Image: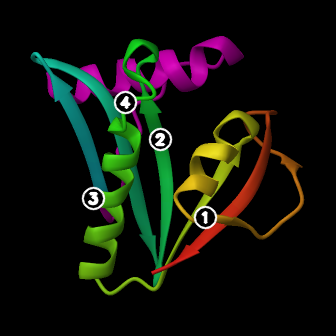
């Protein structure tokens, strides 16, 4: 039940507007966190371990819960767990609208903007040493 709710929220916030089909891809070898408010999942964030790196994925906050620090708290906990697991860096392929959010969390651009190969949206790779 909980996974279904997480997938639906991620799809609504990250993929529906792109006309993408629904996928139920679970995070492999990593961690997904959720934030719950009044029994409603309002945010999610994940990372997958790739060697000594954490690939941040699926960070989303429902619109009416944004700008309340929820996404930042999700990211801080992902960072804490990543450090605990011995990772030395987190990276994200950020969409343009999320670039400012990740900058505020001390992620820095390490690439030029690029068109995502499957989504077709513009992204930029950003990294944060741990």
Left or right? Give the position of 102 relative to 76: right
Q: Secondary structure at mark 2?
A: strand
* Residue 58 - label: 2
User: Alpha carbon of mark 1 to alpha carbon of mark 2: how far?
Assistant: 16 Å
Residue under label 4: 68
Q: Residue at x 38, y 53 (%)?
A: 75
Left or right? Give the position of 72 relative to 4: right
Q: Is residue 62 above or below residue 52?
A: above
Percent x, y of residue 91: 58, 66
Residue under label 1: 107
Q: Secondary structure at mark 1?
A: loop
User: Alpha carbon of mark 4 to alpha carbon of mark 1: how far?
Assistant: 20 Å
The region drawn magenta spans: 1-30
Q: Residue at x 40, y 47 (%)?
A: 72
* Residue 71 - label: none
Total marks shown come to 4
* Residue 77 - label: 3
Question: Which image quarter is the N terminus in?
Answer: top left
N-terminal of the pair, mark 3 or mark 2, is: 2
Q: Residue furthest left?
A: 39
């Amino acid at each position: 039940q909980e996974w279904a709710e997480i997938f639906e929220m991620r799809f609504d916030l990250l993929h529906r507007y792109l006309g993408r089909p629904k996928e139920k891809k679970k995070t492999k070898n990593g961690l997904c966190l959720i934030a719950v408010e009044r029994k409603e999942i309002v945010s999610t964030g994940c990372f997958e371990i790739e060697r000594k790196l954490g690939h941040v994925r699926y960070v989303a906050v429902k619109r009416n819960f944004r700008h309340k620090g929820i996404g930042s708290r999700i990211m801080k906990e992902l960072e804490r767990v990543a450090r605990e697991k011995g990772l030395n860096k987190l990276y994200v392929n950020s969409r343009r609208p999320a670039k400012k959010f990740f900058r505020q969390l001390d992620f820095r651009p390490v690439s030029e903007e690029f068109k995502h190969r499957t989504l077709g949206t513009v992204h930029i790779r950003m990294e944060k040493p741990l």
